[in-house]
Image: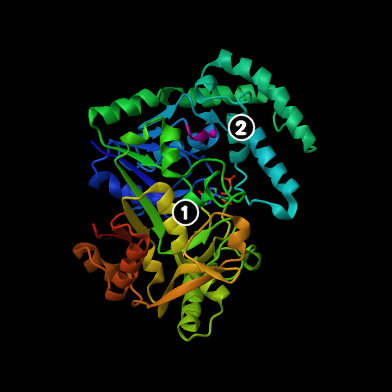
Amino acid sequence: MTATAVVDAQCGDTGKGKIIDYLIPILCIKFNCRTGGGENAGHTVVVEDEVIKFHLYPSGAMYPDVLNIIAPGVVVNPERLIKEIDSLEKGKHKINLLVSDNADVVFSWHKALDGAQEIRRGAKLIGTTKMGIGPAYMDTAGRTCTITMGELIDPDIFREKLDIVYPLKELELKAYGIGMQETKEEILQKASEWRARLKNYVGDTVYKINELIRKGENVLFEGAQGTLLDVRFGTRPYVTSSHPIAGGVCVGAGVSPKLIDSIIGVSKAYLTRVGEGPFPTELGSYEEIKNETQPEKEEEIEKVAKELLIRINNGKASDLEIGRYLRLKGGEYGTTTGRPRRTGYVDIPMVKYSHLINDFDKLAITKLDILSGLKEVKICTAYIIDGKETERFRPNSRELGKAEPVYETFDGWPEMTSKDWVPYVESGTLPYEAELYVDRIEELVDVPVLLASVGQERHQTVFLNH
Ligand code: IMP
């Protein structure tokens, strides 16, 4: 029996979707359970010519014999889930899904509140995805205003609950000077459509998962977002409202920590962050890139990236340009919002802090291919804060705002096409300089590296098995 948790060691967007899709056959997984967050998450899975972007549907979607479970810890926007089911069905994928009847539903008022609260925060905004996640989890904690998936699929209970919740939410929105987005009748109508589409997928997941694990089945727990976005242990207030850490898997799914056998941390070979929040190794600044958009054409991206690479390797590029290069080459634009992701060098004190909180058994390093072609690459090993050097990351946004990174610099490895990676994928090795780079991360974090991802597709993965 193995229960494996896959969680993000950074600020989200490390490519957990691809890693889970890759690991499912390797770990003989038949049950994949998403444990937290909502449609604020974005996972991209690429298999052959097909690119599927999910927000809610778990990442085992490409395997017809894998049951994908949405645990109670997830907040579910039924509209989004139905859209994802539709697009999977269109692509002739089997829907093998179980949604917890104890998961809370995200409604239009949550989104409206999310937007209104962000406006109210003014310059101190969080930079949320505006998907209603914070307000939905606030209702979970507040107890009175939640409506679960189980309640949604029972028309009488739903009507009863709506009678309680609607006026309270109306009142709350009024404080922000806005009204409800929909009338009660419109919500009831929508709910009946959602019910018709989703009722067959809704059921108990807690007994199911616990029985599966105790029966010896292999279960994978899919974390969403990243450790540094944890509502308690992340860089508050620039965090999401759930627990993306390994402990959050237990809270989200309703399993004992004793039942999780292995925890895999996923970290990019560099670092990105979307939205506001501290970022000591950032290349450039959020202010400068906020309005940047992703060039539409592939050729345009390649052309600009090529020009930037020449400047970088000639030592002529500014930090902002290096950051832009990583953004363009890595396709670092939000899956959910399209926002440009802030980019920077890998931050070891941060990943070590993540390891402290999660106790990783293995690390998966993603997007290693994006660094190829750079003459040199850097790793942040410590910070200088108020004149003092420290290797300790504390998720204190004020303190981190002052942190100056201390870097180790490494020789880069040659520019490589996907074909150039094939022998490395086949032999489970890396180009010499890339190996040194990964080995140093492994040594500093003190966690063995299981694999390095060198492309979006499932097969573009080097299984190192350290
Ligand atoms: P929220 O989760 O929409 O409330 O957003 C709170 C913060 O978490 C913002 O900085 C978002 O950009 C960030 N965030 C939420 N979900 C993700 C994700 O899946 N990847 C990266 N950042 C995320």
Question: Residue sitting at 38 percent across and 36 percent down?
Answer: 33
In the image, what residue type sits under mark 1? Asp
Secondary structure under the numbered disc 2 in the rendered image: loop
Q: Does the residue labelled 1 lie within 8 Å of ligand 1?
A: yes
Bounds of the magenta segment:
73-77
Residue underneath mark 2:
107
The quarter in which the C terminus is drawn is: bottom left
The quarter in which the N terminus is drawn is: top left
Question: Farthest residue in the left direction?
Answer: 427
Relative to 313, say whether 372 is above or below.
Answer: above
Q: Nearer the viewer, residue 126 or 301?
A: 126
In the image, what residue type sits under mark 2? Phe
Q: In which quarter of the image is residue 448?
A: bottom left
- Mark 1: give few (<14), some (14-19) or many (20+) Cα within 10 Å: many
Visible residue check, residue 226: no
Relative to 157, say whether 24 is above or below.
Answer: below
Question: Residue sitting at 42 percent across and 38 percent down?
Answer: 249
- Mark 2: give few (<14), some (14-19) or many (20+) Cα within 10 Å: many
| 293 lies left or right of 429 | right
Q: Distance between the residues labelled 1 and 2?
A: 25 Å
| 247 lies left or right of 335 | left
Residue underneath mark 1:
13
Q: Nearer the viewer, residue 161 or 457?
A: 161
Residue 103 at x, y = what percent?
A: 49, 29
Visible residue check, residue 144: yes
Mark 1 near mark 2, Cβ–Cβ under 8 Å? no
| 373 lies left or right of 117 | left
| 449 lies left or right of 104 | left
| In the image, residue 258 lies in the stretch drawn in magenta | no
Question: Residue sitting at 34 percent across and 56 percent down?
Answer: 364
Secondary structure under the numbered disc 1 in the rendered image: loop
Whichever of callouts 1 and 2 sits on the residue coming sooner in the sequence is 1
